[in-house]
Amino acid sequence: MTERVSAPETSGVRGSGGDLVVMGPPGVGKGTQAKALAQESGWIQLSTGEVFRDHIRRQTELGRRVKTYLDQGAYVPDDVTVDLVRDRLRSIPSSTRVLFDGFPRTVAQAEALDRLLAEMGRRVAGVVILEAPRDELYARLSSRAMAEQRADDTPEVIANRLDVYDEQTRPVISYYEDRGLVKRVNGVGRREDITARLREALES
Ligand code: AMP
């Protein structure tokens, strides 16, 4: 579980309020970066992938329902994912910004998120896309597979996850681009440099 409330908003990324979305293909490092940004800014990071993995580890009912999808690198159905996000959002104070990490991943999820946030008097204020070439992503996911032995990091599953991203998640970028919310950030380089680029993108 990666919801965290850390130090008050002392430095770094500020904005006019509203919630933020970090998107990017598998292996680009969005989870690590989202964690760093949320920590330094006092936001709550809401990572659907982490929440699913946590349920699988704890062998909850939800964990049993979603395990096969994660193992195959397929997306969990929208209704299951949106229900989970709705539940989480209910426990977050309206004054605290949320950094969505790995959600929304389909246009239906993006539309559902807009509705959910509107009901709660919230809105998406900015979307950053972390980018890296496919070869680089493939290499990173393969080495993570060796290090962490994640079931969703086998060669076939890695290729599938990258394809699913192209097919289902790229349209979400267009969805937000049409509203002028998107900033693209180069996800290749030193970790701290990438965090700085993201911070700058979110500040502007
Ligand atoms: P991540 O940690 O963000 O790479 O997510 C790991 C896996 O969790 C994905 O490959 C999907 O199987 C599942 N998942 C995470 N977020 C979502 C989402 N927004 N919609 C559907 N499936 C998701």
Image (cartoon, rainbow, N blue to C red):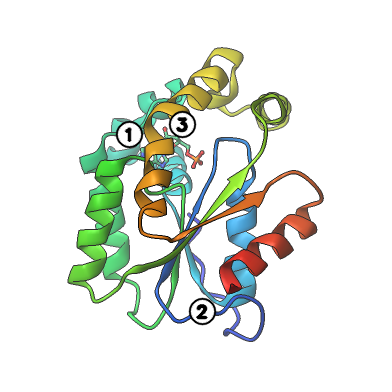
- Ligand 1 in which quarter: top left
Q: Which residue is mark 1?
A: 76
| Residue 16 x, y percent position in the rendering | 46, 82
Disc ID at residue 189: none
Disc 1 crowd, CA 10 A, few/some/many (<14, 14-19, 20+)? some
| Residue 38 x, y percent position in the rendering | 57, 68
Q: Do the numbered discs 2 and 1 sit on residues whose CB atoms are within 8 Å?
A: no
SS at mark 2 in the image: loop
Q: Which residue is mark 2?
A: 15
Disc 2 crowd, CA 10 A, few/some/many (<14, 14-19, 20+)? few
Q: Is mark 1 within 8 Å of ligand 1?
A: yes
Mark-to-mark CA distance, 2 and 1: 32 Å
Q: Quadrant of residue 63?
A: top left
SS at mark 3 in the image: helix
The residue under the point 42% across, 42% down is 58
Mark-to-mark CA distance, 3 and 2: 28 Å
Position above or below: 31 against 25: below
Q: Nearer the viewer, residue 114 or 44?
A: 114
Disc ID at residue 165: 3
